[in-house]
Image (spheres, rainbow, N blue to C red):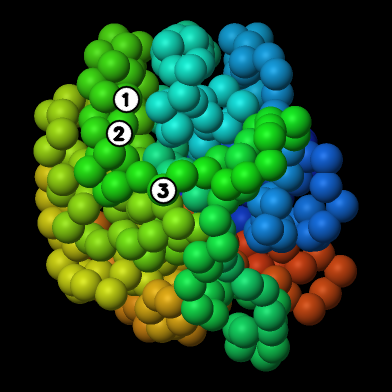
Amino acid sequence: MKLGLGLYRHMLTQENFRFAKQAGATHIVAHLVDYFRGTSHGAKDDQPTGTDRGWGIAGDPELWTLQELINLRRNIEAEGLKLEAIENFDPAHWHDILLNGPRYHEQIENVKTIIRRLGEAGIPIMGYNFSIAGVAGRVTGNFARGSAPSVGMDGPLDKPLPNGMVWNMVYDEKAPQGTLDSITHEELWKRLTRFLNEILPVAEKSGVKLAAHPDDPPLPTIRGQPRLVYQPAHYQKLIDINTSKANQLEFCIGSLAEMTEGDVYDSVDQYSKQGRLGYVHFRNVRGKVPTYKETFIDDGDVDMMRILTILKKNNFDGVLIPDHTPQMACAAPWHAGMAYAMGYMKAAMKSLNIS
Ligand SMILES: [Mn+2]
């Protein structure tokens, strides 16, 4: 098992690679989507939460180029680290896959191209979140220990999604007024199935794994749209769609712990036993949807040492990243929060003889 750190797009700098290395990481998970693009709300060094109009403007009109991906991997390797995964597609590149819209075929080709380029650039995993509303409905507050700023949920969010928005970002600023029609859970699973069956053969051929994040927050619907993986059992349904070894999970302990059914330890056992974990979001939380708060890693409902013990028993050999942490009171709130989580993880791994 390996320790990694996730970095948002604007944090992909030499300084932050060194910070990761200093905090004990051997691997990086990189976000290439700029969640904050074109907005003034929200601190850039925090998790994006946004407004009713989402996080920001979806973006890059261009697909990520092979050269850009190779340069990123080289810059990371120059600091003695490895690039394990890219996390999340840009809604600009795949909105009509989620929405089954008119540009579906063009955008399936976009995703195939991205996967092939990851393979060529030597990046082993693509993390994704197949969700129409995306990470919506979270609130921020001084929820964590010592009044540390953190995120959580304080009741469901049913306000319908405006046209031109998907995955909590605006992909079409000129979309006509009005809101997106609701679809059924069956329809959403149909869209995912079609997506996986088209993309997984390309992923396999490219030596890239597709790793699915569960819904954050995991409610059955948000903003009038169905969610896919909002109970632990839904993950089994997802991997049973296609038996390809490239069909993997971006296994978020925090989101699993927020779910109302199942047991987080049983879930970790069930999925790690099947060898389907691409990488792990190792974070803690107090409460369950629709009322929960993200906590410091040692301070939530989940016994993180027990999680590690199960992962070790099932020979999970991938990367753990802290995912999110509360912000600490100092000049570098995000970095201090991450350094705290990484120190804890490093010590926990060492005490269990995980190398
Ligand atoms: Mn997560």
Q: Is residue 5 left or right of residue 202?
A: right
Q: How far across and how far down the image is residue 36, in percent?
A: 75, 45
- At horizontal 16% and vertical 29% (from top left) the residue drawn is 242
Q: Are marks 3 and 2 in contact (CB under 8 Å)?
A: no
Q: Are marks 2 and 1 in contact (CB under 8 Å)?
A: yes
- At horizontal 71% and vertical 67% (from top left) the residue drawn is 336
- Circle nearer the viewer, 3 or 2: 3
Mark 3, secondary structure of its residue = loop
Residue type highlighted by circle 1: Phe
Packing grade of label 1 (10 A; few <14, some 14-19, many >=20) is some
- At horizontal 32% and vertical 70% (from top left) the residue drawn is 259
- Circle nearer the viewer, 1 or 3: 3
- At horizontal 78% and vertical 78% (from top left) the residue drawn is 329
Residue type highlighted by circle 2: Leu
- Residue 349 visible at all: no
On residue 229, the disc is none
Residue on which disc 1 sits: 195
Task: Give the Cα distance between marks 2 and 1.
Answer: 5 Å
Q: Is residue 91 left or right of residue 230?
A: right
Task: Give the Cα distance between marks 1 and 3.
Answer: 20 Å
- Residue 31 visible at all: yes
Mark 2, secondary structure of its residue = helix
Residue on which disc 2 sits: 192
Q: How far across and how far down the image is residue 82, in percent?
A: 53, 32
Residue type highlighted by circle 3: Ser
Packing grade of label 2 (10 A; few <14, some 14-19, many >=20) is some
On residue 182, the disc is 3
**In the image, residue 350 above or below residue 148:** above
Front-most of residues 55 and 302:
55
Task: Give the Cα distance between marks 3 and 2.
Answer: 16 Å
